[in-house]
Image: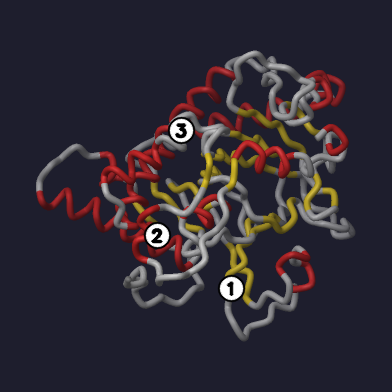
Amino acid sequence: MGTISTPPSVPLDKLPIIDVAPLLSDDLSSEAKEARKKTGDALNRACIDYGFFYLNITAYADPDEPKELTRLAREFFDLPQAEKDKISLSNEDHARGYQRLKENVTNGKADNHEGLDFFRPVENPDKTKPLWGENQWPTVPKFREKYEMWIEKMKKLGLIVMESMAEGLGMTKGEWQDLVSQVDHSFWSMRVIGYPPLPNDHDGYSCGAHKDYGCLTFLYADPTPNALQVFLNRPGVKSPEASDLPAEQGAAEGIWIMADPIPGCIVCNIGAMWEVWTNGLYRSTLHRVVHRGSNYRIPFFFEPNIDAIIKPLDVIKRKEKEGKQMREPILYGDYVRSKVANNFVTGSERY
């Protein structure tokens, strides 16, 4: 068998910008089909080289929509502490709701941000079971209405991008339908994050170095520059901040680059499930936040179904070298519960 084609890499110093406009058209002309193919190829290349890229969504979403979400976020985070605590994580399953400043933990260190977390609603909610509680919505007028509209938009975008990625990988229609069956009831999550300026003496970060553990992350970032940092593997190049990497990274070699906001774009990165699906061809990328402003970011996580069994795709098996070891299957529900268990100081003993 042959190996998966990997075109020559480009210098890894700037994240690519990929326009979703060609993916929104039903035009069956040869030109439109070619444009969609080029987009799939670009996504494939970006996932191989970076695991991170910008998505230009001006053809998909009104830029004023996420701006309104950040206005509502500010209104919530500006409330008195006692009012915010009324929807605390401790009221539910220790995953859905509000967390105070430094209540979120990454790599054993407190993160310098407040947060508000939502997950896909579940049948027969039971807050004594991990991830099986109910979402807690602020009483800020229009908050729930506007955020639920954004959730629906991001869920649709997840399927649009996934289909293009499947084309870029060379999947057959049947293989794509099999992949759809693993994400068509996405156990999505969304965070609303409030970042105060990071104190110079804080023993940690606004959000410490980590990899996302699901499928696709769509981040609407505030205008603050030099906040989101992405670690690019560069053999032979040792970052002076390598000691700040998670222990499981070992002696990683590479550099940190800035993923500053670009008007009309969201930042997208792939999670660990794509590593399994592609047997390591795609790699989830370390990133962290060092926020010196006072603003709000809204990441939406498009995840597999909670009962999905994630394993290497047939297209990968078909093209890999004969005899190459395949990743072990993962039940996504078990995986995500184990990860969320370590996210918060207050909830770890519950999982």
Residue position marked by numbered label 1 in the rendering: 233
* Viewer-side residue, 118 vs 266: 118
At label 2, which amino acid type do we have?
A: Ile
At label 1, which amino acid type do we have?
A: Asn
CA neighbours of label 3 inside 10 A, class few (<14), some (14 to 19), many (20+): some
Are dots 3 and 2 in contact, CB under 8 Å?
no
User: Residue 312 placed where, x, y %?
Assistant: 47, 54
The residue depicted at 84 percent of the width and 25 percent of the height is 90
- Judging from the image, what secondary structure is the residue with disc 1 in? strand
First in sequence, mark 1 or 3: give its number: 3
Q: In the image, is 241 to the left or to the right of 304?
A: right
User: Cα distance, mark 3 to mark 2?
Assistant: 25 Å
Camera-near label (3 vs 2) is 2
Asked which quadrant contains residue 42, the reply is bottom left
The residue depicted at 46 percent of the width and 68 percent of the height is 49
Are dots 1 and 2 in contact, CB under 8 Å?
no
